[in-house]
Image: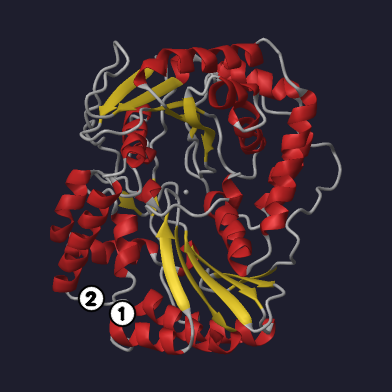
Amino acid sequence: MALAAAPPTKGKPAAPRPAAPAATATVPSPTAAQPPKRIFPFPIEEHLLPNGLRVLLVKFDSPGLVGYYSLVRTGSRNEVEPGHTGFAHFFEHMMFRGTEKHPKEQYDELLSQAGVSNNAFTTDDCTAFHAFGPTRALPLIIELEADRFQNLKYPEDDFRTEAKAVLGEYNKNYSNPTEKMEEALLDTAFSVHPYKHTTMGFKADVEAMPSRYAYSLEFFKRWYRPDNTTLIVVGDFDAASTLQLIEKAYGSWSGRSATIAIPSEPPQTRKKAVNVSWANPTQPRLVLAWHTPETRVSTPWAALQNVLGPYLFGPTSPLYNDLVLERQLVTSLSGTYWDHRDPNLFGVFATLKSEESFGEVQKAIDATLAELRAGKVDAKRLEDIKSNQKYGLLNSFDEIESVGLALVFSISPTGDPRALDALFNHMDALQPKDLVEFAKTRLIDTNSTAVTLVGAGAKPPPGIPEYTPQPAPSTGDAKKGGAR
């Protein structure tokens, strides 16, 4: 399930929603008219500072240990200006460049001496910084994090150096065939929404980053503001004294984040397909994805898609048994879905043994979807998967990091730390007919995008054009006013 997964290493008031075709107006079965069940097992003490900074305090049985998250609800989704994709991820790097009070080397040394490990990650919808260490180091963590969020400072030479490092990271990431397929999928499936580019950004924009120093200063002013930031403290700590420390350290932080108009992705009306030819020998791969009407974790649509992936493509599915175990045409098969702030994609990813099997694998997937559209649903297996999703997540809450990440990936797309409760209440209400309706209206050819990949010397499926990067859309500007 998306919320239980590890964060991507490549590092979304709501934006306008893409219009959905009229045929998809049916929403999955609503929850019964009764008080929602609480799924997230830990009480959340929530505070809102006068400057708009949100603070969540979550006690967890981790004697002497604490986790500290600084969540900025800005990711690659916010990169609407042509020529500046990848900047949210790039700025994650710059946040480790230090301040006048605590230069980079001192910042690193202080945390290391205190036994604190720290890192960060960027997604389509957010940038999250995290630190883990002994509870006695919490005052130091708060001091250092508050300082860099308010007083970050770096010279242009450091900026240029980091920009070159980010280009190196891009080249490293996209020497991986699967990463390149993701880039091709998003670029092909989306036409105007910023989800068209990966978190790393378009390569031309990454190459131009060394010249964007002035823009980087503006980016910090736009997005690293208290009203766009949530602090999450998880573990063994005193709530009252921790809140006092946070109020003192962050209380003078001022400013409001920028607002932007996110362009709505128009409905897809034709089947899309591209091939990626890899320069070296590698196993052939296939990804097939469909646009979905909603992917925020608190919605019935998200509950449906979290279940539908393992139902159609997971180890208990007839398709998995056919392609992986019996005919052994593929070595791996899985659903692909990640909760997002705006509508995104639902799909399937397969690694094949031979490019000669593309046709058979596609035929088997098509047959599986046709059965679902015809109303064939294994109700018992559906209930088992719903149960597995819920208890699999609950069983993962055995360490600080998993609890913190669950909150990060609840807040990032929805703004609501209790979104998990809504997700699983919607999941409990799911009926077989909901899967059938989704398949009829969404899992159709005219709403699909396919990407194949073949290695050196292998032939792609006939009739599929080679992928070429699409021109970056001119999508707008960040300014005051509009939707965040």
Q: Reading the chain from its start, which is encountered first: label 1 or label 2? A: 1
Q: Secondary structure at mark 2?
A: loop
Tell me the tag on residue 400: none
Name which residue lies at 42% across and 85% down. Answer: 112
- Which quadrant of the structure image shows residue 441? top right
Tell me the amino acid under the disc marked 1: Gly
Q: Is residue 152 visible?
A: yes
Asked whether 321 or 363 is in front, the reply is 321
Residue 350 in picture, x, y percent from top left: 46, 29
- Identify which amino acid the numbered label 2 is placed on: Tyr
* Crowd rating for badge 2 (residues with CA inside 10 Å; few <14, some 14–19, many 20+): some
- The residue under label 1 is 98
| Residue 287: quadrant of the picture | top left
Q: Is residue 269 above or below residue 67?
A: above
Position of 215 with respect to 430 (left or right) is left
Kind of element beneath mark 1: loop
Towards the viewer: 144 or 349: 349
Residue 304 to residue 252: above or below: above
Residue lying at 15% horizontally and 71% vertically, measured from the top left = 156
- Residue bearing mark 2: 154
In this rendering, is residue 306 above or below 189?
A: below
Q: Quadrant of the N terminus?
A: top right
**Residue 430 appears in the rendering:** no
Residue 284 lies left or right of residue 32; in this view the side is left
Residue at horizontal 33 percent and vertical 29 percent from the top: 191
**Way the structure is coloured:** secondary structure
For the residues bearing labels 1 and 2, Cβ distance under 8 angstroms: yes
